[in-house]
Amino acid sequence: MEKRRRRKTRTLAQFLRRYFLTTAFGVLAILAAAVLLFMAGLNAGFYTSADHNEKQAQELIGKIQRQDFFDPAEVPDGIHYLLFSHEQLASSLPEDSALADFSLYTGSYTGRIGAETWFRTDLRAEVVILLFRYEVRPTVPGIAALISDLQGLFISVTAVLLLLYLWMTTNRYGKKLVQALNALEESATQIASGNLDFTLHDTPLAEFNQALDSVDTMRSALKDSLVQQWDMQNQREIQIAALAHDLKTPLAVIQGNVELLQEEALSETAGESLEAIQRRLGQLSQYVLQLQQAACSQNQAEQPKVTPIHELIRRCTEEVSGLCRNKEITLTVFCPPFSARVHTETLRRALINLLDNAIRYCPPGKTVQLMGAVTETNWILKVSDEGPGFQAESLKHIGEPFYRYESARSSNGHAGLGLYTVSQAMQIEGGRMIPGNVPDGSGAQVILEFPLSSLADDSKTASAPDLKYPLEDQN
């Protein structure tokens, strides 16, 4: 594995402080630029100052007082007037304006109503009120007509620039955080998928790198553990295969001697003993075969292929037909025609093991059933018998190698490898083995459940039979 690439990092606290300082200095810079730009425009005469209307109103009030005469034509833009004369009103305000009430201006010569500021002066028979606002106005009349609130527009543009800067800065620093989080997520995803040979790259943040160091340590430890387990598994398989191979020779010698003795004239007692030895030799040969199957790794190299499942079932039933005849057992089979992509020989051996177990523990004259079906979520193979069934305690350990459960099903003796071989086969097929008992208590059953994705395209519409024992009862 490549060595992790190191680069300059900072702590999360330093990262957040840098984000804060960058944001604060950026905001201050935008505000300072806005103020300088505003002052430059003001000095250049592009627009008036905010107190320009006040100065014009004061000058006009002074002129009115000196002349003791008011001429509405002398009122500049940005200022409204009210002229009260003998209770007659003249005004530049709209007719329905609430500001055209004389009582608002009595008792003082200056005041403020909302956003409007007013100056009052009294002539001999008239009262003049000038109203204005503190506002920045363009000096060009055409622009002033288009932009009624220049300072509001200026503030809005500044606010938009601030928001845009904040968004860009937050997005920039947020991407760095997301990149650090993605590094952690990617490493967890790689480990979860079983890939332990990948390179971890450092992030700009020290805390995330510490977490990645922990993940890297866990990855290395997990890889070493799996390699060790793999070596142990291979060694165990080699030992089991060697043991099975060594057992075949003495069994063959014993079998040869038994066959020679069977040709001799023996007493009835000796003949019965010889038959018992013959039966036990058959059992020992079966155990050796199971040992070889359990230790055999060739199924991992076998490539899956599209296999007619109903044809595979027919082959398996032909192989065990002799066992059924010897015990007068009826083997019933139901499987609609459909195909799936499976490891053919692996699945065949699994089915033979299930049928052999079912026939061995099924009482003479009873029935063993083998059924195949396609459901909405998967496809299954089910083997059931009318034997004593599984005990609840034994169901917890079924599938473990060499497990021998104490129940009526152990009366014939077994090596504890049959269902282990089936369980291993189902792992290869990507499915699962569900051992259990028939719900009505009439015997044992084992369901092999396969993913629906392994079905051949022309078999995905195959109809499922009316299952007597629903799958949810088997767990």
Image: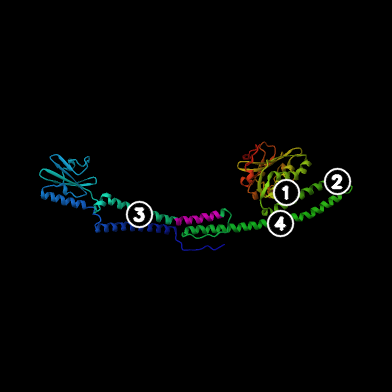
The local crowd at label 1, few if under 14, some if 14 to 19, many if 20 or more residues have their Cα within 10 Å, is some
The image shows residue 356 at horizontal and vertical percentages of 73, 45
Residue at label 4? 239
Across and down, in percent, residue 364 comes to 76, 39
Q: Please report whichever mark, 2 or 4, sits nearer to the chain's N-terminal start.
A: 4
Neighbourhood count class around disc 4 (C-alpha, 10 Å): few under 14, some 14–19, many 20 upward = few
Question: What quarter of the picture does the C terminus occupy?
Answer: top right
Left or right of residue 1: residue 148: left
Label 4 with label 1: CB-CB less than 8 Å = no
Give the mark nearer the N terminus: 4 vs 1. Answer: 4
Q: CA distance from mark 4 to mark 1?
A: 16 Å
Label ID, residue 415: 1
At 10% across and 49% down in the image, what residue appears? 67
- For mark 2, give the secondary structure: helix
Q: Of the residues shown, which amino acid type is indicated by label 3? A: Leu
Dominant secondary structure, magenta: helix
Disc 3 to disc 1, C-alpha distance: 80 Å
Which residue is the site of mark 2? Answer: 271
Residue 13 marker: none
Q: Give x and y (percent) for residue 324.
A: 76, 41
Which stretch appears magenta? 175-190
Name the amino acid, label 1: Ala
Q: Quadrant of residue 387?
A: top right
